[in-house]
Image: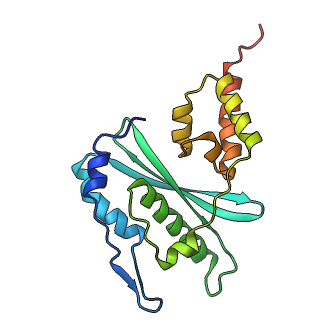
């Protein structure tokens, strides 16, 4: 796997202590803004770009925000994902606040994975962490078959999905992954004359 130039230096130089304190629950934490503010001067120094985007997924009637953090040098990129559930049962919060909170949590964990931030426990990690369901063995075989049929670069495909192996593809990404490969197969079929 090709890593963006200077990404390792940025990760090594990045310092993002848990400088915020929740005095009620007595824990220290960092938020997305803390991480991005610490990154900005290093991104400029190392000529890298950081982008974070969100997607919304319905998994068995439960809504999840999937955040993807990408660092790029313009030629190569490295990505990581984070997930958080949109829990509409949270009392005292509007839907905008609920979705903003879920987005922040998902983004924070996508950035933590991308930038190798420590995973020491804090209170918000319990609220945001949900076990991510992965595809079934049958779905994995289907993707493997489509990769072979389309002569796709498996490494690039896995990198695009943010996983190391086909069996680790999140269940919520299966339809998208299958669709991309099937569309590629359709474009490879020559029209009848």
Residue sticking out furthest to the bottom:
24
Q: Residue at x 69, y 29 (%)?
A: 146
The quadrant of the image that shows the N terminus is top left
Q: Quadrant of residue 56?
A: bottom right
Q: Is residue 149 visible?
A: yes
* Rendering coords of residue 176 (x, y %): 67, 43
Q: Is residue 43 visible?
A: no
The quadrant of the image that shows the C terminus is top right
* Rendering coords of residue 55 (x, y %): 60, 55
Q: In the figure, 74 relative to 114: above or below?
A: above
Q: Residue at x 69, y 35 (%)?
A: 143
Residue 148 lies left or right of residue 162; in this view the side is right
Q: Residue at x 36, y 65 (%)?
A: 35
* Rendering coords of residue 22 (x, y %): 42, 86
Q: Residue at x 51, y 76 (%)?
A: 124
Number of marks: 0
Q: Quadrant of residue 76?
A: top left
* Rendering coords of residue 141 (x, y %): 72, 35
Q: In the figure, 79 relative to 13: above or below?
A: above
């Amino acid at each position: 796997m090709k890593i963006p130039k200077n990404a390792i230096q940025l990760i090594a130089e990045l310092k993002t202590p848990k400088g915020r304190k929740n005095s009620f629950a007595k824990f220290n934490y960092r938020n997305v803004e803390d991480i991005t503010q610490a990154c900005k001067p290093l991104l400029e120094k190392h000529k890298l770009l950081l982008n974070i985007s969100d997607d919304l997924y319905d998994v068995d009637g439960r809504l999840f925000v999937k955040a993807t953090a990408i660092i790029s040098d313009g030629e190569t990129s490295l990505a990581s994902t984070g997930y958080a559930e949109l829990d509409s049962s949270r009392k005292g919060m509007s839907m905008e606040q609920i979705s903003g909170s879920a987005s922040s949590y998902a983004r924070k964990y996508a950035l933590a994975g991308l930038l190798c931030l420590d995973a020491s426990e804090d209170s918000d990690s319990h609220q945001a962490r949900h076990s991510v369901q992965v595809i079934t063995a049958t779905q994995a075989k289907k993707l493997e078959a489509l990769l072979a049929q389309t002569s796709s670069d498996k490494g690039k495909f896995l990198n695009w999905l943010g996983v190391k192996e086909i069996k680790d593809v999140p269940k919520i990404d299966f339809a998208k992954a299958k669709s991309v490969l099937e569309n590629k197969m359709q474009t490879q079929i020559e029209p009848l004359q």
